[in-house]
Amino acid sequence: MASRKTLNAKNLEALGSDRLAELLIEISRGNAAAQRRLRLELAGAASPADMAQEIRKRLTAIARSRSFVDWHKRKALVADLETQRQAISQVAKVDAGEALDLLWRFMALANPIFNRCDDSSGSVIAVFQAACRDLGDIAIAANAAPTVLAEHAYRALIENEYGQYDGLVAVLAPALGPTGLDHLKHLILKLSQEPRQEPRAEDRKVVGWGMSGPLYADDLAERHRSSVVRLALAAIADAQGDVDAFIAQQSEKARGVPSVAVEIAQRLLAAGRAEEAWAAINAVDLDRPGWIPVEWELTRIAVLEALGRADEAQAFRWVCFERSLSPEHLRS
């Protein structure tokens, strides 16, 4: 049996509400984070609208901050962000529409924060990626209009500079539905057709230096646009179950990369197109130097088995095992 002096909820309850309130005031004195948390809880107890207003105020304050967050300040930032994310989830239980708006505002903090933050630990991006995953359920609960949601997603994909929106299309696909996915695809295709901005030579802005010389802002912007288009169309293709559209986003050169060959072959295999999967998995140039990942070998085995070539699959499995001694081959 736990001692009465053990720090747990039951023993604290025994102190009574008055004493606990006094302790919280004392403990939070001079602790801005604790005070914010208490104000948030008080606002939530008053009404969801008050809680949402408190969250909005805090998000605005974070957005206005310009100070650099180094490694020893990062923990406090992560705790603050996580508190706001959890609070938004609480709002979602009673007002999903308001929570969805707050969550988009929360996600909009990512780029400015990463521009002034040392996130070598990956703890800050983890909070934003968790918030990105929250968008799916909250969008469904809010019964968000598919086309409006698609427009939010479109802007988010363009602003995905640090990976905070990675996986967004898959997360939102159930809420977007066919109408939203089609609208998002239309927006992305329209982006792909926009003419490239060609500044005059004297107006080009150097933003860095690489092995081959200066890096220009317009070149980087064009690369970003191309990447957004390719990744978004591939993700939309997956959400729509369109294997051919996914493959179309992979260049001929990319299809020879083992990881890409695996992605293509696995999708073709799932679609019952084993012969095409065989061609895809063998598009890799095995004579080129470089490590062949286990995933490629396992996928090749799976394709052989799907083709009914069990003896070849077993022979290849054994060759792979002899070379790597990986137990994964024996389990496949």
Image: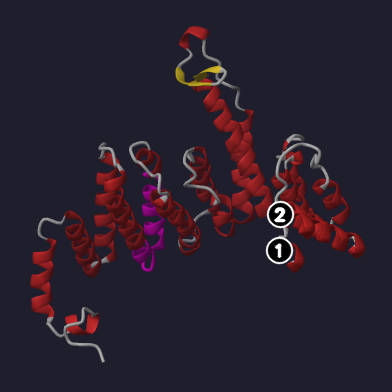
Q: Is residue 248 above or below residue 2?
A: above
Q: Range of the magenta residues?
A: 89-109
- Side (left or right) of 320 relative to 224: right
Residue type of the residue flagged with mark 2: Val
**Going from the N terminus, do you reach mark 2 or mark 1 first?**
2
Q: Residue furthest bottom?
A: 1
Which residue is the site of mark 1?
Answer: 328
Tell me the residue at 38%/68% (across/down). Answer: 93
Crowding at dot 2, Cα within 10 Å, few <14 / some 14-19 / many 20+, comes out as some
Crowding at dot 1, Cα within 10 Å, few <14 / some 14-19 / many 20+, comes out as some
Tell me the residue at 75%/34% (across/down). Answer: 253
Quarter occupied by the N terminus: bottom left
Which residue is the site of mark 2?
Answer: 294
- The stretch drawn in magenta includes residue 103: yes
- Side (left or right) of 157 relative to 35: right
Residue type of the residue flagged with mark 1: Glu
Indicate the secondary structure of the residue bearing disc 2: helix
- The stretch drawn in magenta includes residue 237: no
CA gap, disc 2 and disc 1: 8 Å
- Expressed as whole percent of the image width and height from the top left, the position of residue 44 reads 25, 66
Give residue 88's quadrant in the image: bottom left
Dominant secondary structure (helix, strand or loop) of the stretch shown in magenta: helix
- Expressed as whole percent of the image width and height from the top left, the position of residue 215 reads 51, 20
Q: Are marks 2 and 1 in contact (CB under 8 Å)?
A: yes
Label total for image: 2
